[in-house]
Image (cartoon, rainbow, N blue to C red):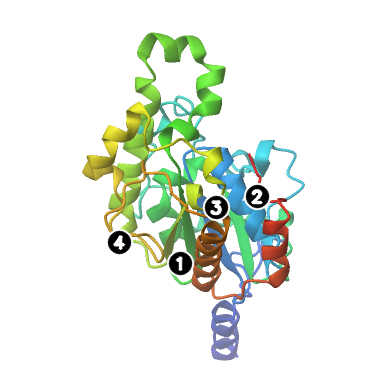
Amino acid sequence: MVVVFVLALVVMVVVGLMVEDVDGVPLSLSQNNQLVFVIGVQYEAIMHVMDILGQHPEVSLLSGTGKPKNDAQHLQNVFKTAHELGGMLSFSFHDEAHMTEKSELFTDDSRLALLGSWRDHWDLDKPLLALQSPRFATMTRYLQALFGEDNTKFVVVLQHPLHAWRPALNMYWQQAALSCGKPFVQQWVHIHQTLEEDMAHLKHVHVVRYEDLVPASHVPTPDNQLHQYNREPAFKFRGAGAGWRQGQGLMQAPRFTSLAQQQRQQQQVLNSLFHFLRVSRPVALWTSFQDSAILNHR
């Protein structure tokens, strides 16, 4: 009788229906669910990609959280938020910001607590459960280890630093004026250096450049004073994912000779993204793209 019970429990674990705790929260999601972590430095680029993913019938986004941008970090109390680590302008330099599979928080209790804080805000009938937070940029290895490499996918959204920090530059204009924006650039560089090192340990990771998804008029031109950083290795994600052009610097804004060329490029980027997620790109998505619901996102 004991043997039968043990075998039954093993089967339940394998199919993702593990026993529930006292609050009724399972230790794992269904075998049909995968977590899609959308990562970037600032919300503008992240939310742009989330808007695209949210239009797919097989993707569920966190919703109804009551938190700004439905940012996943603010729904949990397992790991420290960016604010607790010094704020959006400096959190990546904190000793506790970078989390890997060696973290003391790599436990079943942590996995249970995080799923419990997020799962009620998804439609669990959909196979892809997407969530975003700038905080995730320094904890990708931890998240993969915690939820399993076959259950996690990472979409890294790269964005020109001048464009990425534009909202912060406006909000902290006095600090920006006194420092010439140095803290903003330092944070951007450090986060991307950490990401590039960690991506070598990730099984499923895809890189999208924000500038490839919006009209060129909405992004800084390659002629601005920061273009010099294009030559620095830290600003180049070589071979970091499907669709990322070898050796092309992030600082270089895309150049298109016609609207048709720009649209072809955007279709390629979208096709590559949904191919990575192993779902087809719906025709309606490109229609909304052309109708400016997404294309003219600012």
The disc placed on residue 239 is 4
Label 3: state its secondary structure. loop
Q: Amino acid at mark 2?
A: Ser
Q: Alpha-carbon distance for marks 3 and 4? A: 19 Å
Mark 1 → mark 2, Cα distance in angstroms: 18 Å
Check the image and report above or below for 272 versus 97: below
Q: Which mark is residue 213?
A: 3
Q: Residue furthest front?
A: 257
Q: Position of residue 79 (x, y in %)?
A: 49, 41
Q: Amino acid at mark 1?
A: Gly
Sequence order check, earlier mark of 3 and 4: 3
Question: Is any atom of residue 95 visible in this view?
Answer: no
The C terminus, quarter of image: top right
Give the residue at mark 2.
Answer: 117
Q: CA distance from mark 3 to mark 2?
A: 31 Å
* Mark 3 in CB contact with mark 4 (< 8 angstroms): no
Q: Amino acid at mark 3?
A: Leu
Residue on which disc 1 sits:
148
